[in-house]
Amino acid sequence: MRILNSPAKTAGGNGDRKNLDACSIVIFGASGDLTARKLIPALYHLFKEKQMPAMFRVIGFARREKTDAQWRTELRTALDQFSRTKPVDDKVWAAFAENIFYCVGDLTDDAAYAKLGKQLAAFGNPALSENLLFYFAISPSQFGGVVEQVHKSGLLKKDGPGWQRLVVEKPFGHDLPSAQKLNHELTRFAHESQVFRIDHYLGKETVQNILMFRFSNSIFERLWNRESVDHIQITVSEKIGVGDRGGYYEEAGALRDMVQNHMLQVLSLIAMEPPVSLEAEAVRNEKVKLLQSIRALTPEDVAKQIVRGQYFAGAVGGQMRPGYRQEVKVKPDSNVETFAALKLFIDNWRWSGVPFYLRTGKNLPLSASEVRIQFRPTPNVLFAAQCGNKLDANALTLRLQPNEGISLHFNGKVPGTTIGVRPVRMHFSYDAEFGAYTPEAYERLLLEAIAGDATLFIRRDEVETAWKIADSIRTGWEGKALTNREFYGAGTWGPIAADDLLAQLGHVWHEPQVIK
Ligand code: BG6
């Protein structure tokens, strides 16, 4: 991994473009939402900030008949809507758009791949037809077929010349066997090192900062263990409901949609051991080790340690939302979870006995992602007379989004003649310190894939270990209908069962703060 703000390739400026190989980015599924909303805006910004290779091409591959010019016009319209900086810079766009091309073709048609090969060769520079980033913005059921086709057409090789990489999106399987099957399909014609599995949480600045924060600050890292930490809470709350994604969500649920990937990724960065270096394999080895040391869950454990929830109708921010069972394409008696809360234990030397609480849900009061490291309390003898047992323990909050920042919570004396003690906080805000520059996760991830650095991508064993955990939870839930304590009103912080879960050890959830 390259360190943020280092003078290396990612730091911006013309020097960067010299360091990255000329290449072509081929997007399969170019007509889809992801291309217009995320990929093209990300590439445009990388180009604008002079971080793209000096020479590159983007080819959109899709079935719909259209010309390069038509596709460029469509993308420009979408960019006006989705760009994180507005207005779009006409001059920059014009220069960027010259590199964008379209290839009409069916994913199952041999001839289409031959045509793609010819189009790449016609760029007239071997690097543009040999260094290829294949972006799979398509359904996972199509991955295997496309990999085989690009291999057959000679565009994907295991050992060069040039380099070829496969960038794939979630959902990466729906359980362990399906993920293993996908992995097998992807690596039939490519090495594992050529596969870049995206979890967009790893592209977020604040998530990357977890490792920097932990391993470049001696005062925190020495407290980062069972001796000092009482428990850890990871909250990813979302104000949105499932909206028009009911069909997908019925198959996924919060566990597959958020926990198996984003939340376990955040957990592994928070809890992993220091890697021997910042190289991709070193970091990923430690993440896998951490996931492997999460205590396995039997169905009895699931009943005690894992809570699911589903929202019923209620108001979020003053706006009425339908219940999950009333959403489009959702079964009226669905038991799919829109909320999940987990109590996990990590059986290793550092964390033995420390509960890790994870929760995520839709239609909660606030969109916020936070990690709270709750330290052990002091012996409550000195201030017991004034504060009873209400004295807050120290805590450190890593706010991942929005209002990115870090807060340290401690107790201070209330000014005055009495010995009043009150929790106060010291706060660091990214915006205040670094200005409002927050690149989109996809910018960073695309750049890393172009540079061939896999640190921010999920390795095969990582994804499979995470599925093992999710599968054991699903097995525990199998055939069980939701109970009354598992329903929650839209606009509340989740079901009562989630509070019960923490109450087992005398803990309470800390709601993310509204930071203005
Ligand atoms: C996606 C999930 O992976 O992550 C969505 O499919 C969820 O359901 C989204 O809303 C959350 O991402 P972010 O970046 O908005 O926190």
Image: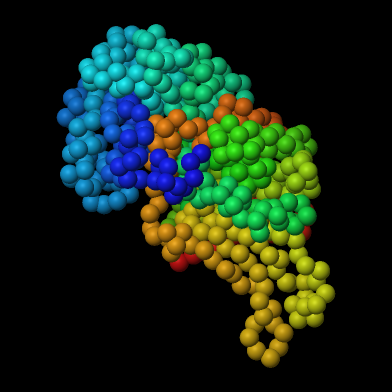
State the quadrant of the C terminus: bottom left
State the image quarter where residue 149 is shown: top left
Question: In percent of the image, x 48 and y 57: which residue is there?
Answer: 404
Any part of residue 22 in sight? yes
Any part of residue 310 in sight? no
Question: In percent of the image, x 63 and y 33: which residue is there?
Answer: 285
Left or right placement of residue 436 versus residue 505 in this view:
left
Left or right placement of residue 474 versus residue 120 in this view:
right
State the image quarter where residue 329 is shown: top left
Q: Position of residue 456 (x, y in %)?
A: 51, 37
Q: Position of residue 421 (x, y in %)?
A: 69, 78
Q: Position of residue 261 (x, y in %)?
A: 56, 37
Say which of 17 and 293 sits in front.
Answer: 17
Left or right placement of residue 309 versus residue 348 in this view:
left
Say which of 202 and 72 sits in front.
Answer: 202
Question: In percent of the image, x 40 and y 40: which residue is there?
Answer: 9
Q: Looking at the image, is 397 positioned above or below residue 244?
A: below
Say which of 102 and 241 sits in front.
Answer: 102
Q: Looking at the image, is 377 positioned above or below residue 233?
A: below
Q: Position of residue 187 (x, y in %)?
A: 52, 17
Q: Looking at the image, is 265 positioned above or below residue 137?
A: below
